[in-house]
Image (spheres, helix red, strand yellow):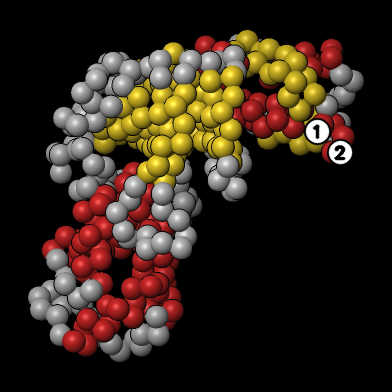
Amino acid sequence: MYLNEIKRNIRKFFQGEATEEGRWLIDQWYRSFNNKSSELTGYSKEEKEKLRRDLWTDIKASANVSQNRRRIQDHGHSPNMISWFARIAAGFIIVLLALLPVLYFQGVVWSEGQNVGMVEYHTISNPTGQSSQVTLSDGSTIWLSAASTLRYPDYFGDNRREVSLIGEAFFDVKSDPNRPFVVNSGQLRTRVLGTSFNIRVFENEKDIQVTVATGRVSVEQSAVSADRDSLEEESFNPIAILNPEQQLVFNKKTQTRTTQPVESTLYTSWKDGKLIFENHSFDEIARRLERWYGVDIHFAGSPLKEIRFKVTFENNSLEHALQMLQVIEDFEFEMKGDQVWIK
């Protein structure tokens, strides 16, 4: 189902114009807790059931709806029911919008340009310490980095090719002038026809980076802001056109952006097993090593974090990588399992 169609059905639902699609979407929202593996890791089936019931109770309470209100009927909608819709709308919309990405990743919500109910989606989630490579139905190849997630369809529709990314990936996109290739990555959407580029969009990092190796890339920013009706038509504004050896750095908090010339291999060589650092702080390097090797790195003091290095690791073990850093600066390290202490 198209995302804009989903929004229209939700809006009609809360205006009392209940549709089959609207009721279906709300039912899927309720059922989606059974499949929210990432957010609900460790929860039992009974705990998930309690959580979603408690959440629904909180939504009704926040809208000042008492427990003895009549339930939503499958057919017809009286004035009392319409009033009930209006009063729960504010609380429900907040929760629903928060879960739209979950529904999208589960295949409940389809993006525009895809056939309804006919496309099977796949999700690849790499743990820390592991990367992978996938070839899509159009011949495009994607290298997915550690601690990253990619969602893509079995095949693409007639209008465009679309995937979603959390984390980091390098894309080598097959040219198709009639079907743009679109990557959804948080607040940004990257659109190309055929090119190679790298996107870095980790949740715990302040910036989103789009780096172009070959071809031309258009980057768009979501136009939906906090002071707008979140159920209105979703739109994106173009914010940058990138050529080879250019990079867009987008600050997620301040919504500011910078376009700068770069040496793209510094940001794309990871797919070949090579990590290149140019005047990076020890803290920045440590965060990258944590994902790359699947470890936690702890510093004995802040001054150590600020030491800067120019170094390249190529298929090194973690111990060897740290020993290389020791040659440049004086520090000690201790490794116990997946825990590393720098002192």
Q: CA distance from mark 2 to mark 1?
A: 7 Å
Label 1, on which residue? Answer: 305
Residue at 58% over, 33% down: 258
> Foreground: 275 or 113?
113
Classify the position of the C terminus by image quarter.
top right
Measured as percent of width and height from the top left, residue 169 is found at 46, 26
Q: Amino acid at mark 2?
A: Gly
Which SS class for mark 2?
A: loop
Residue at 53% over, 15% down: 245
On screen, residue 317 versus residue 188, left or right, reads: right
Residue at 41% over, 53% down: 224
Name the mark on residue 301: 2
Residue 1 higher or lower than 309, as above or below: below
Q: Residue 116 is drawn in which quadrant?
A: top left
On screen, residue 268 versus residue 7, left or right, reads: right
Q: Are marks 2 and 1 in contact (CB under 8 Å)?
A: yes
Q: Residue 28 is drawn in which quadrant?
A: bottom left
Q: Residue furthest right?
A: 330
Which SS class for mark 1?
A: helix
Measured as percent of width and height from the top left, residue 314 is found at 63, 10
